[in-house]
């Protein structure tokens, strides 16, 4: 199902020019704008992030089962398939994009490695001293974040600002993944606790961790992105096996969104204007991209935990009893 709505796409990019202009977080809801698919015969379209200019980055699975990155530009046109030259496993995933259309992501050879790309030019990246690197988010200043396995053996989040790399872990986590960094240096992502349950968090610019972010009824929460207002998006599963998209507006507002008729909805990225990108699963098992946005609403927000602030380096990470390599969720 391919919908070419370049006019609507441009509208999304400029909608809600100032989120602060709305009355308050409780007055927001998520509204569907459009759906889209990578052209040709693909098994899955998996958008990840949306730039402040409205370009989308993600990945798709082709008819042969290979995974390639892609960019959907502001006018609704798509890039050719993006495959890292050193990808030997058929897995290249676009993860982040900024307003200059620089993208970041990961590819697989002997293990996972990060990359940056502009057009068809790739530059590979590994955190120095790490055995596993994925680059998951990128801001307009060129700062970036992701997850790696350093010499400690505990999978950590990392971020790079001004060329300086800092690794960190959420208190008591067995694995920490950093998915997006905004212009203020606030980082959003998820972590895995000692019971193997996933929870959302954000790392504030002072280094403190605010967690857990869990919508009501969640049996596992994954946070994928934040914007410059630190509005956060992700997905969560419930006891019935359904997966819901959600937004979290600190300190305590949750908004749930489900694509009509779908048992799986994921919200993966949000930009400065409140435009949201994600995906849903249809009844035939095919994933499709969605574009949505925050709009004023008189409805009641959803409930969830009120995350608490934890001082930086308050508690060490905990080694996992099993494998410590956690491939990042998509």
Image (cartoon, rainbow, N blue to C red):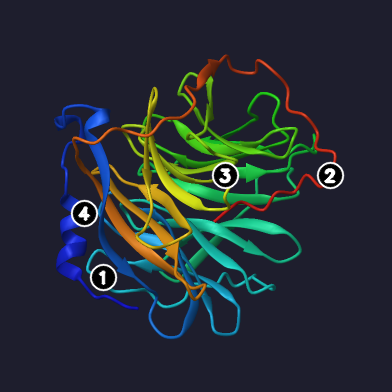
- Check disc 1 and report the residue beneath it: 76
Pointer 3 local density, CA inside 10 Å: few below 14, some 14–19, many at least 20: many
**Mark closest to the chain's N terminus, 1 or 3:** 1
Mark 4 or mark 3, earlier in chain: 4
Circle 2: element type: loop
- Does label 1 or label 4 sit earlier along the sequence? 4
Q: Which residue bears the numbered disc 4?
A: 13
281 lies left or right of 228: right
Q: Is residue 57 above or below residue 76?
A: above
Foreground: disc 4 or disc 3: 4
Horizontal arrangement in the rendering, residue 107 relative to residue 53 (left or right): right
Give the mark nearer the N terminus: 2 vs 3. 3
Q: Check whether the beta carbons of the residues at disc 4 and disc 3 lie within 8 A of each other.
A: no
Does residue 201 appear in this view? yes
Q: Nearer the viewer, residue 174 or 284?
A: 284
User: Marks 2 and 3: CB-CB under 8 Å?
Assistant: no
How crowded pointer 4 is (Cα within 10 Å; few <14, some 14-19, many 20+) is rated as many
Quarter that holds the N terminus: bottom left
The label nearer to you, 2 versus 3, is: 2
Q: Which residue is mark 3?
A: 146
Residue identifier under label 2? 322
Q: Residue at x 76, y 64 (%)?
A: 110
* Secondary structure under the numbered disc 1 in the rendered image: loop
Number of other residues with Cα within 10 Å of mark 2, as a class: few under 14, some 14 to 19, many 20 or more: few
């Amino acid at each position: 199902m391919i919908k070419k709505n370049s006019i609507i796409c441009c509208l999304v990019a400029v909608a809600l020019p100032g989120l602060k202009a709305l009355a308050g977080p409780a007055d927001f809801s998520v509204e569907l704008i459009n759906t889209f698919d990578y052209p040709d015969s693909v098994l899955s379209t998996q958008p990840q992030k949306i730039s402040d200019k409205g370009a989308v980055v993600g990945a798709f699975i082709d008819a042969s089962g290979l995974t390639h990155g892609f960019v959907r530009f502001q006018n609704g046109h798509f890039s050719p398939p993006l495959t890292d030259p050193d990808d030997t496993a058929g897995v290249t995933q676009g993860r982040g994009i900024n307003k200059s259309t620089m993208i970041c992501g990961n590819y697989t050879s002997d293990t996972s490695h990060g990359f940056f790309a502009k057009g068809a030019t790739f530059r590979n990246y590994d955190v120095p001293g790490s055995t596993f690197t994925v680059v998951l988010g990128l801001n307009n200043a060129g700062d970036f974040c992701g997850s790696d396995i350093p010499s400690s053996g505990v999978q950590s989040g990392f971020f790079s600002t001004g060329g300086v790399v800092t690794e960190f872990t959420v208190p008591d986590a067995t694995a920490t993944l950093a998915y997006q960094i905004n212009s203020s240096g606030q980082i959003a992502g998820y972590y895995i606790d000692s019971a193997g349950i996933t929870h959302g968090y954000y790392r504030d610019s002072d280094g403190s961790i605010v967690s857990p972010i869990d919508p009501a009824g969640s049996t596992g929460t994954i946070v994928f992105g934040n914007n410059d207002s630190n509005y956060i998006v992700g997905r969560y599963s419930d006891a019935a096996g359904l997966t819901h998209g959600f937004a979290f507006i600190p300190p305590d507002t949750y908004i749930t969104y489900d694509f009509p008729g779908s048992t799986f909805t994921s919200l993966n990225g949000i930009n400065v204007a409140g435009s949201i990108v994600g995906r849903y699963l249809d009844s035939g098992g095919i994933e499709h991209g969605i574009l949505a946005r925050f709009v004023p609403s008189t409805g009641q927000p959803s409930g969830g935990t009120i995350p608490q602030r934890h001082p930086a380096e308050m508690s060490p990470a905990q080694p996992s009893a099993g494998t410590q390599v956690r491939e990042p969720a998509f």
